[in-house]
Amino acid sequence: MRNLYRIWKIWISLAVISFMFAPLLQGQDNDSLKKEVEELRQQNTSLQQQLQQQREMIDQLSRKFSGLQKTNDQQAGSIRDLQESAGNAPPPLEKQNQFSLGKVVLSGEGAAGFFESERNGEFPNAAFRVDEVRLFLDAPIWNDVYFFGQIDLQTHEEGDYGVFLSELYLQWENLTKNWGQDGVLNARIGQFYTPFGEEYQRRFAIDNPLISHSLSDLWGLNPGLELYGAFKHLNYAVAVQNGGLSVLNDGTADKLLAGRIGYDVAPWLSLSVNGMRTGQLSVNRDFLSTSWFGSGFFQSIGSTNATDFQVNLAEFDADAKWKGGDIHAAGGWAGYWDNDVMGDNHRDIYYYYVEALQHATPKLYGVARWSQIRAPKGYPIMGGTTQFFLPTTDVWRMSLGLGYQFTERLVLKVEYMFEGGELVSGSSRNHENMFAAEAAFKF
């Protein structure tokens, strides 16, 4: 019994001691925990310092590698200069997959198909037709100076085959690179397309999702000087050209002036404003302007007393795109004047178009374009016909098409085009609708 009491006494004593020293033991545990946390913090700080040292070492290695790469590029440039002096420089890397003759790169585009219109349209006899054939020559001259030439063997505007000189110019790129501003200023001199509007840049068959163009279809080709470039979200092009249809001389000293300023509002939206004056054109020496409008050139509508005429133009363009589709829209004004003392022949002409494209699959797409020209007092507008080159007050066109893009180098297209309008006399323009199917390609 005494032993039992002794054991019980020992257990009670141990319980009391544990209760009394529990806070102290807990404090010791907290001190140990704090010590461990502090050690972890020190280790983390050490690791961060090591990571920073590694980053600095990587930056140093990157700078050294960039220096070595720049040295290699300079050495490669020196080798290329030596090769050029020997006349055996290899073609640029981006052009090695194209056919070349030495430093001259040859490429081309074309289109062929079937066209059938109603009786007043352009193809009333259902014609098979080679619609476009173009050859391009591109060659480096010296440093950033290049030659570009384009020969047209057939275009939609020509009635038969022939060899026609299209673009041919010298281009000096990146004139501001020595000031650290790449691409801000470039120049070309020779014969080139007038930088007005956006449609002319995609009117070739391989670039045009439809077969027809908008009714206005504004473009021009003439000798002159052009400056163009881009800075951040802005891009621009300005040109001075002869203005008349002749490519060898100018009928008057007054020149064509054209310019375009574009702004990329967002990756999916671009806007541009455009202005142009044809300059005073001689009725007897220039005959026609170089600017193509409404399937014909601007021309004098004055009496035989008119010796000069002029057209001023302004246009606003908007392009938007989304996944699998895009939309292009433009609206503009053209004002005609001449010096006919027999009467006031001033004309205000308004035009616009809207084109929308949507892919059903990555290769198959549908596209629609609506375009219209209004000249309240009447102006010769040919449109899609061979019979109505007469004063027209209103003409419209609705084009619906499907396309299948095998690759970026081969596209099959079909289109049905509705067209109508009204002449100054009040008569209707009708029976001009057209069906067309075409294969467009490039190489």
Image (cartoon, rainbow, N blue to C red):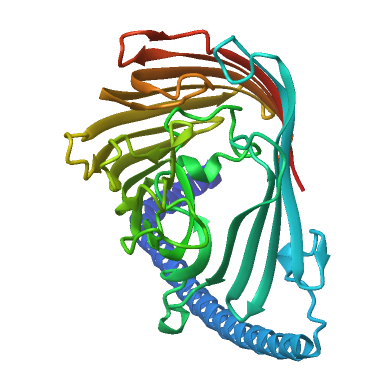
Q: Is residue 188 left or right of residue 96?
A: left
Pick the residue in front: 354 or 252.
252
Number of disc labels? 0
Q: Front-most of 149 and 28? A: 149
Position of residue 177 relative to residue 37, above or below, is below
- Left or right: 44 in relation to 361: left
Find residue 355 and report its horizontal and vertical position in percent.
Answer: 46, 27
Query: 48 or 330, which lies in front?
Result: 330
Residue 440 shows in this picture = no
Q: Residue 87 in the image: state x and y as whole percent.
A: 80, 85
Position above or below: 288 against 423: below
Residue drawn at point x = 31 percent, y = 12 percent: 425
- Left or right of residue 49, residue 128 in this image: right
**Horizontal and vertical percent for residue 95?**
74, 63
Observer-nearest of 8 and 321: 321
- The residue positioned 61% from the left and 72% from the top of the image is 146
Query: In terms of image quadrants, where is residue 107?
Result: bottom right
Quadrant in which residue 202 is drawn: top right
For the point 48% across and 25% down, the residue is: 356
* Residue depicted at 47% across the width and 17% down the height: 398
Q: State the image quarter where residue 304 is shown.
A: top left
